[in-house]
Amino acid sequence: MKKIKIIQRKSKIGASPSQRATLRALGLRKIGSVVEKDLYPQIDGRIKKSRSFHIY
């Protein structure tokens, strides 16, 4: 499975509880945190939902 590196670039202050839960599910805790995940459809959907946090 292809690996993807996910980086949180923006604060989650002011985000909806749903978006905060998505960031937690991805393993992102604070600005600049980096996680590496396998690219499954579930992970891809979470990334697309959290694009406003400048996740790459």
Image (spheres, helix red, strand yellow):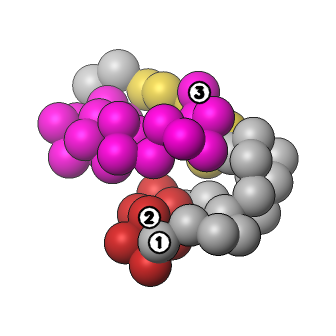
Against 21, residue 11 (above or below) is: above
Q: Residue at x 74, y 47 (%)?
A: 10
* CA separation in Å, label 3 and label 1: 20 Å
Q: Quadrant of residue 1?
A: top left
- As shown in the figure, which amino acid type bears the numbered disc 2? Gln
Highlighted magenta segment, given as a residue range: 37-56
Residue at mark 3: 56
Residue 26 is labelled as none
| Secondary structure, magenta segment, majority class | helix
Q: Position of residue 42 (x, y in %)?
A: 20, 46
- As shown in the figure, which amino acid type bears the numbered disc 1? Ser
* Image depth: mark 3 or mark 1 in front: 1
- As shown in the figure, which amino acid type bears the numbered disc 3? Tyr
Residue nearer the viewer, 52 or 46: 52
The reply to whether the C-beta atoms of the residues labelled 1 and 2 are less than 8 Å apart is: yes
Residue nearer the viewer, 42 or 49: 49
Classed neighbour count for the residue bearing mark 1: other residues with Cα under 10 Å, few (<14), some (14–19), many (≥20)? few
Question: Would you say residue 5 is visible in this rendering?
Answer: yes
Is residue 6 rendered to the left or right of residue 43? right
Q: Residue at x 25, y 41 (%)?
A: 45
Against 54, residue 15 (above or below) is: below
Q: Position of residue 47 (x, y in %)?
A: 40, 40
Question: Would you say residue 34 is visible in this rendering?
Answer: no
Is residue 7 rendered to the left or right of residue 21? right
Residue at mark 2: 19
Q: Position of residue 37 (x, y in %)?
A: 45, 41
Classed neighbour count for the residue bearing mark 2: other residues with Cα under 10 Å, few (<14), some (14–19), many (≥20)? some
